[in-house]
Image: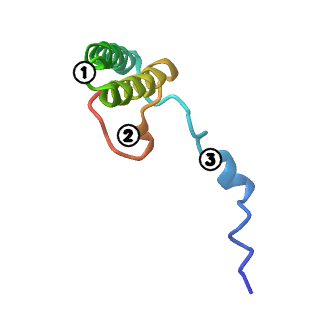
Amino acid sequence: MRDTRRLAQTREETQTMKPLLSPNIDNKGRLVRGFGALGLFVGAWFVFQRLPWLGVVLGASGGFVLFEALRGWCALRACGIKTKL
């Protein structure tokens, strides 16, 4: 028999939890991530002619970093890892 007491969160626990993709970086971090995404996209464009798989990987990485910059959210910080920017 399962213990169902821990399956349902209490209202206090729910209210104190942050939303999953809540902003956790400032404008400086967003700017750095934006330039990083630009660098990844440029690298993907140059490399795609010789190694298409690497171009796709760099482009996908650039898309994720651009999402972080636009959203103001850092995946590493969301996991509890402290970053400088």
Q: CA distance from mark 1 to mark 3?
A: 50 Å
Q: Which residue is mark 3?
A: 16
Would you say 37 lies left or right of 10 here?
A: left
In front: 37, or 78? 37
Front position among marks 3 and 2: 2
Residue 37: x percent and y percent?
Answer: 36, 18
Q: CA distance from mark 1 to mark 2?
A: 31 Å
Name the secondary structure under disc 3: helix
Residue 38: x percent and y percent?
Answer: 34, 13
Identify the residue shown where x is 45% and y is 41%: 78
Would you say 11 lies left or right of 69 here?
A: right
| Sequence order check, earlier mark of 1 and 3 | 3
Determine crowd level at label 2: few under 14, some 14-19, many 20+ residues with C-alpha closer than 10 A: few
Please determine whether, in this image, residue 20 is positioned above or below residue 7: above
Quadrant for the C terminus, please: top left
Q: How is the image coloured?
A: rainbow
Residue 52: x percent and y percent?
Answer: 33, 25
Q: Which mark is residue 65?
A: none
Q: Which residue is mark 1?
A: 50
* Picture quadrant of residue 54: top left
Name the secondary structure under disc 2: helix
Name the secondary structure under disc 1: loop
Q: Which residue is mark 2?
A: 76
* Picture quadrant of residue 26: top left
The single residue placed furthest to the bottom in the displayed view is 1
Front position among marks 1 and 2: 1
